[in-house]
Amino acid sequence: MNAEKNNLFGFNAFSPDEIAEKVETIGVNKTKLPLLSMIMLGILAGAFISLGAMFFVTVTSDTNITFGISRLLGGLTFSLGLVMVTVAGAELFTGNNLIVMAWADQKISSGEVLKNWLVICISNFIGALIIAFLLFKAGHQEMNHGAVGKLYLEIAEAKSTISFQKAFFSGILCNILVCLAVWMAQAGRSVWDKVIVIIFPVSAFIAAGFEHSIANMFFVPMGIFLQSEKATAYNLISWIGLFKNLLPVILGNLVGGSGFVAFIYYVIYRRKSRHKF
């Protein structure tokens, strides 16, 4: 009776074993999407993450907030992006690192995995660029007496000049948390369940300053657009700087999401379906 009551009110979650099965099935379905649907869903995800990043900058541009509170609020606001991806429906490159589970179980081919990652990553980039351009043209950077624009420039320059090693390992840590958020969201039976479990891991990686490749596809172009408007002191922001950032961050995100989350959970929960030891 209690179990039925809990199920009625959405209090019981799927078990980790059930999540693994769901993630594997979802991974197969993701690779079977029609190309146009894959592209459009990828563009949406890039836009959603960018809107979360916009929310983050708007709030943290207030210099009167103490460091800890600012990082906490920044994490909470940035969570909007992954919440929209998960609830509204979109295809995010970093979250799609989990399809390695279906690949490890031989449900999909290496070619299908690589095609999905390439198409979704490029589509995410397009979505991020669209939002950056729209916000720039809308004058979003002028908010808080220009402090919003200044923070965009600071973030863009920091990301354009980050070292390969720092970007790579920061990317690993970031996507461990992002993929755990996506993983745990599969445990939920309601929208509220999913929102709650997404907020904390995403807030943690934002508070710690880890590197998310799709967010960077928004932050650096926003800085480039601002530079094009007028001369600034942030001269190290460039398209070259963006791609120098994206290479190690994407590699780090892949290792973090595919290796530290998807593959480990495959070994724990799905390998037993093929092996007895």
Image (cartoon, grey):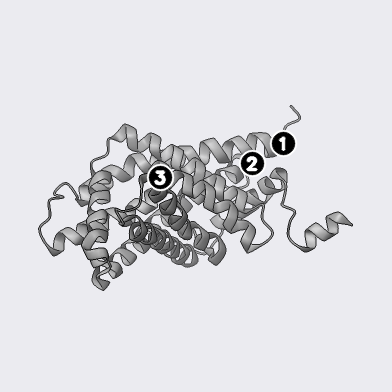
The single residue placed furthest to the bottom in the displayed view is 138
In screen coordinates, is 133 left or right of 32? Answer: left
- Which secondary structure lies at badge 2? loop
Looking at marks 3 and 1 on the same chain, the residue that comes earlier in the sequence is marked by 3
Q: Closer to the observer: label 3 or label 2?
A: 3
Q: What amino acid type is highlighted by mark number 3?
A: Gly
Which corner quadrant of the image does residue 247 belong to? Answer: top left
Q: What amino acid type is highlighted by mark number 1?
A: Arg
Which corner quadrant of the image does residue 191 belong to? Answer: bottom right
| Residue assigned mark 2 | 105
User: Can you give x and y, in whole percent of width and height, for residue 225 in the image?
Assistant: 21, 61
Q: Which mark is residue 274?
A: 1
User: Can you give x and y, in whole percent of width and height, for residue 39 in the image?
Assistant: 44, 63
Residue 97: tell me if it is visible.
no
- Which secondary structure lies at badge 1? loop
| Residue assigned mark 3 | 68
Which residue is at 63% across, 47% downward?
A: 107
User: Can you give x and y, in whole percent of width and height, for residue 236 in the image?
Assistant: 16, 46
Query: Are the residues flagged by discs 1 and 2 in contact, CB closer than 8 Å?
Result: yes
In screen coordinates, is 215 left or right of 9? Answer: left
In screen coordinates, is 182 left or right of 137? Answer: right
